[in-house]
Amino acid sequence: MTAAGTRAPGAVVGLDVGGSKTHAVLTIDGVQTAEVLAGSANPSSVGVEEAGRQLASVFARLADGNPLPARVCAGVAGADTDESRAVFAGLLAKHVAGAEIAVVHDTALLLAAAGLDEGIALIAATGSVAWGRVAGGGGEAACEARVGGWGYLLGDEGSGYWVARAAVRHALELIDLGDGPDRLSQQLAADCGLQGAGELLGHFYATPERRYWASRSRVVFERAAAGDPAASVIVAGAADALVYLVARVAGRLAAVPSAAGTRPLPVVMAGGMAVNQPLLQRHVRDRLAGHGLHDVRVLDADPVQGAVALAAGTHLPSPIS
């Protein structure tokens, strides 16, 4: 999209910018007219230069026969600071000069994608984080709270990476005890292409890619669904950790005057592991009920739709330009 194009007041662009891909959608007066999938345009993942190249590709493809957008909202993984959001807004401005731009953390897209103005979003994927929002009552501004999202070195409890690492630790503990490998350890080793569980220690350090290990969490869920006691303990621990994140967010927001009064907030589960593991969903639902949170939903829309909804709203969140 270039300055030479025409601008349509009803044209908006929403972007979901993750660590591995970028998903962009253009709508005009509420009708989707273009959709683009590209490599990651996340500066924290690929650097500013590569992020700029990916955005150039995204907007060139969106521009094909379409007008310039009046508003753009991007949800960017890891955009935790004003500085990081300003950097990304600057990259966007090169392609949508004159548009109103907002950059938010990608967790902010989830409630909007679920059609909610307030609630708590729980992401359980390679990493884990909970984020909540309450609409302000009596003219007060909305209030937000976030718990977790520290990354795998410091946190990400209950995430896909955490689940797989717990399974590796379990296998190593059996070796330390002098016991033979159990079914969970054997299946995990086989899924990694190893000859036996004894190779997991070296393989773990030789293969540090987080997404590689997060994808192995499915082995733990398969074993837990089959009644494996060790896998069941790990899955229960993951659910406990995720519910802790939600409970902390709920507690922080409970004291905030809200347009919803004291009504319990809905919880939206999102992220690859949360969406694709029904056993985890059941564990989380059961535990959240103990905290008085009974409205628990699994996100059934692409997060980018939340960016579109925010861009099309009356007021963009935290507008930068």
Image: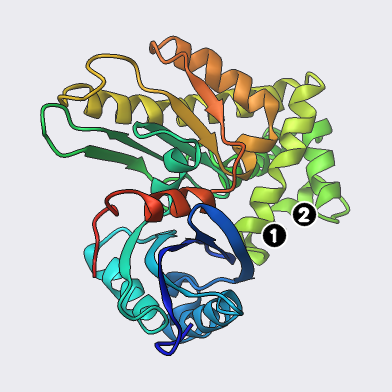
Identity, as a three-letter code, of the amino acid under mark 1: Gly
Q: Is residue 87 left or right of residue 154?
A: left
User: In the image, which disc is placed on residue 47?
Assistant: none
Residue 289 percent across, percent down from the top left: 46, 11
For mark 2, give the secondary structure.
helix
For mark 1, give the secondary structure.
helix
**Marks 1,2: beta carbons within 8 A:** yes
The residue positioned 29% from the left and 49% from the top of the image is: 314
Figure quadrant of residue 245: top left
Identity, as a three-letter code, of the amino acid under mark 2: Glu
Query: Few, some or many C-alpha atoms within 10 Å of disc 2 (few <14, some 14-19, many ≥20)?
Result: some
Residue 171 percent across, percent down from the top left: 71, 39
The residue positioned 24% from the left and 70% from the top of the image is: 321
Instruction: From the viewer's side, name the closer residue of 103 and 122.
Output: 103
The residue positioned 24% from the left and 61% from the top of the image is: 319
Instruction: From the viewer's side, name the closer residue of 119 and 59.
Output: 59
Residue 11 percent across, percent down from the top left: 45, 64
Q: Is residue 138 left or right of residue 268?
A: left
The residue positioned 73% from the left and 32% from the top of the image is: 221
Label 1 – label 2 distance at C-alpha = 6 Å
User: In the image, which disc is placed on residue 202?
Assistant: 1
Instruction: From the viewer's side, name the closer residue of 181 and 268.
Output: 268
Instruction: From the viewer's side, name the closer residue of 317 and 165.
Output: 317
Query: Few, some or many C-alpha atoms within 10 Å of disc 1 (few <14, some 14-19, many ≥20)?
Result: few
Q: Is residue 29 at all visible to an observer of this figure?
A: yes
Residue 49 in the image: above or below residue 236: below
To which residue does mark 2 refer? 199
